Image (tube, rainbow, N blue to C red):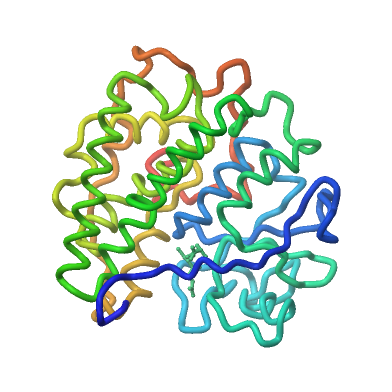
């Protein structure tokens, strides 16, 4: 939180990328890297969804950090002995410090770690999912969808830019605003953008084209957190998602699509935000609601045309070791 006013996100990322040609010294290679995520985090959850839609689970194994953390950030407290079994570390910070002993920026997820060195290669969340689509194609499952197809890229980029500014980051700008004015400005922009997105999605099942794309993944990860955390904790409360009929049906449609809702852990989401952000929730009390059963209600969006994967196919069932416990996910309950 910035006591003086507007929240600004530190968007300086580690510059290296994992590419098919290995130009930065990090060639795509099955089993060489580990994707470190938190299921609480919307930016990391994009990578979880895209990895599953593309069938990269075996080529790019995943480590899930516990939902709460201290000022030294994410820990592997869900794992036996509190260590990631492959990297052998207790905290993600160790992999950032291995990369740069003077690293002094955010120890953020998603992060991709080179298992051979234990060093973080990339924490650039926007790049990570696009690179999964374009650079990791040799390892996609058969029937994987094109989430960033060349013909739609300009439109996807334009939608993503507005969604990032006003929605994905907009909720943080409202929640971490340090002045009434900054909060009100962020809140206004957020709901003005949600109104525009509702208009766009009234006649169209997906944001761009007739199938799921990168643009839907990015909007989904904010919408699925909306009533559970952003409405209360971040004071984004002109309306709940469940009071915005078009966006609510759109979000339910995606939630019920394989690869989306089956990655969501509402327990991790709520505990992370309400416990970690003590500056805006000093008691650390995690609210009991909202009721989640309505995520499975019919959405009636199929009538708009379009199919989630077009000529591609849906991903298969979630691997048992990656399943979200039923109590925290209405799909598995
Ligand atoms: N690093 C990216 C997005 C990733 C991000 O902010 N992740 C959050 C969780 S939602 C995080 O890891 N925070 C941990 C920390 O800063 O200690 C950004 O700031 O634009």
- In this view, the residue farthest toward the bottom is 102
Whole-percent x, y for residue 122 in the image: 67, 62
The residue shown at (79%, 65%) is 115
The correct choice, above or below, for 11 with respect to 164 in the image is below
The residue shown at (56%, 17%) is 310
The correct choice, above or below, for 189 with respect to 92 in the image is above
Q: Nearer the viewer, residue 160 or 225?
A: 160
The residue shown at (85%, 67%) is 116
Q: Nearer the viewer, residue 247 or 196?
A: 196
Whole-percent x, y for residue 276 in the image: 38, 75
Q: Can you say which quadrant of the picture contains the C terminus?
A: top left
On the picture, is 87 further left or further right than 283?
right
Whole-percent x, y for residue 172 in the image: 33, 62
On the picture, is 44 further left or further right than 2?
right
Residue 143: quadrant of the picture:
top right
On the picture, is 262 further left or further right than 317?
left
Residue 302: quadrant of the picture:
top left
């Amino acid at each position: 939180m910035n006591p003086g006013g507007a929240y600004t996100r530190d968007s300086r990322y580690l510059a290296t990328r994992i590419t098919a040609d290995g130009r930065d010294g990090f060639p795509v290679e099955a089993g060489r890297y580990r994707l470190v995520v938190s299921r609480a985090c919307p930016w990391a959850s994009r990578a979880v969804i895209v990895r599953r839609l593309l069938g990269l689970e075996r080529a790019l194994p995943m480590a899930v950090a516990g939902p709460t953390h201290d000022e030294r950030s994410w820990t592997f407290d869900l794992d036996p002995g509190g260590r990631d079994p492959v990297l052998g570390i207790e905290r993600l910070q160790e992999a950032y410090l291995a990369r740069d002993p003077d690293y002094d920026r955010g120890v953020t997820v998603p992060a991709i770690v080179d298992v051979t060195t234990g060093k973080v290669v990339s924490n650039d969340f926007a790049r990570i999912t696009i690179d999964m689509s374009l650079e990791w194609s040799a390892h996609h499952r058969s029937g994987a969808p094109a989430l960033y197809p060349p013909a739609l890229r300009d439109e996807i980029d334009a939608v993503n830019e507005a969604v990032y500014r006003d929605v994905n980051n907009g909720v943080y700008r409202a929640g971490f605003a340090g002045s009434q004015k900054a909060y009100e400005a962020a809140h206004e922009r957020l709901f003005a953008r949600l109104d525009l997105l509702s208009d766009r999605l009234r006649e169209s099942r997906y944001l761009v084209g007739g199938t799921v794309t990168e643009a839907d993944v990015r909007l989904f990860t904010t919408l699925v957190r909306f009533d559970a955390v952003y409405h209360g904790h971040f004071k984004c409360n002109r309306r709940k998602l469940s009071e915005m009929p078009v966006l609510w049906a759109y979000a339910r449609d995606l939630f019920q699509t394989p690869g989306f809702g089956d990655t969501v852990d509402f327990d991790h989401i709520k505990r992370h935000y309400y416990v970690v952000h003590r500056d805006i929730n000093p008691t650390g009390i995690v609210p009991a609601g909202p009721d989640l059963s309505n995520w499975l209600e019919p959405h009636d969006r199929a009538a708009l045309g379009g199919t989630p994967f077009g000529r591609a196919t849906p991903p298969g069932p979630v691997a048992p070791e990656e399943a979200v416990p039923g109590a925290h996910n209405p799909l598995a309950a």
